[in-house]
Amino acid sequence: MLDSYENMIAFGLVVLPLIVIAWAAVVHVSMAMETHRYERYKRFHAIMEQLARSDGATADKMAAAYELRNYREFKDVIARIFADGKVRDLKAEALQKQLKDTLDHVGH
């Protein structure tokens, strides 16, 4: 099969574009997944803002709380904010603790 230079060159001319196409597909899928993750984060953040609004309607807050069920990847954040079905009172000390835990997690 690859017994002559012509065959090697022909094989390279077939395989090289396929490798480039495969690499481009991997990069495209990776970028699309990152965009999707960012869009999900933005939607999650908007839901959390809806819950935090003091002037929002109760029905809107109930719908937002229901929608949080679709964001299992943020379960740690949701658990830290809510306790026993109530919104935790996030004062400065709770924020300090969260920042300290984050620093510990990233290996400061």
Image (cartoon, rainbow, N blue to C red):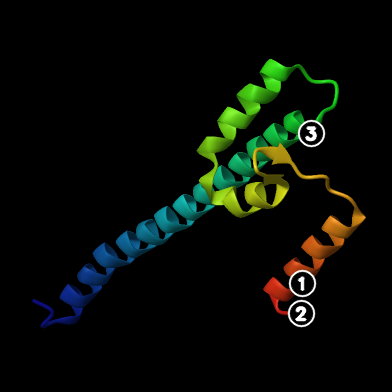
| Residue found farthest to the front | 84
Residue at 83 percent of width and 57 percent of height? 94
Question: Looking at the rendering, which quadrant does residue 96 occupy?
Answer: bottom right
SS at badge 2: loop
Residue that numbered label 3 is attached to: 52
Q: Give the residue type at disc 3.
A: Ala
Marked residue nearer the N-terminal end (1 or 3): 3
Residue that numbered label 1 is attached to: 103
Question: Looking at the rendering, which quadrant does residue 5 occupy?
Answer: bottom left
Task: State the separation of the CA atoms marked 2 and 3.
Answer: 30 Å
Compared across the picture, whether 34 is left or right of 60 comes to left
Q: Between residues 74 and 39, which one lies in front from this camera angle?
A: 74
Task: State the separation of the CA atoms marked 2 and 1.
Answer: 5 Å
Query: Is 71 located above or below residue 7 in the figure?
Result: above
SS at badge 1: helix
Marked residue nearer the N-terminal end (2 or 1): 1
Marked residue nearer the N-terminal end (2 or 3): 3
Q: Give the residue type at disc 2.
A: His
Q: Give the residue type at disc 1.
A: Leu
Density class for disc 2 (Cα within 10 Å; few <14, some 14-19, many ≥20) is few
Q: Nearer the viewer, mark 2 or mark 3?
A: 3
Q: Position of residue 8 (x, y in %)?
A: 20, 77
Are dots 2 and 1 in contact, CB under 8 Å? yes
Are dots 1 and 3 in contact, CB under 8 Å? no
Residue that numbered label 2 is attached to: 108
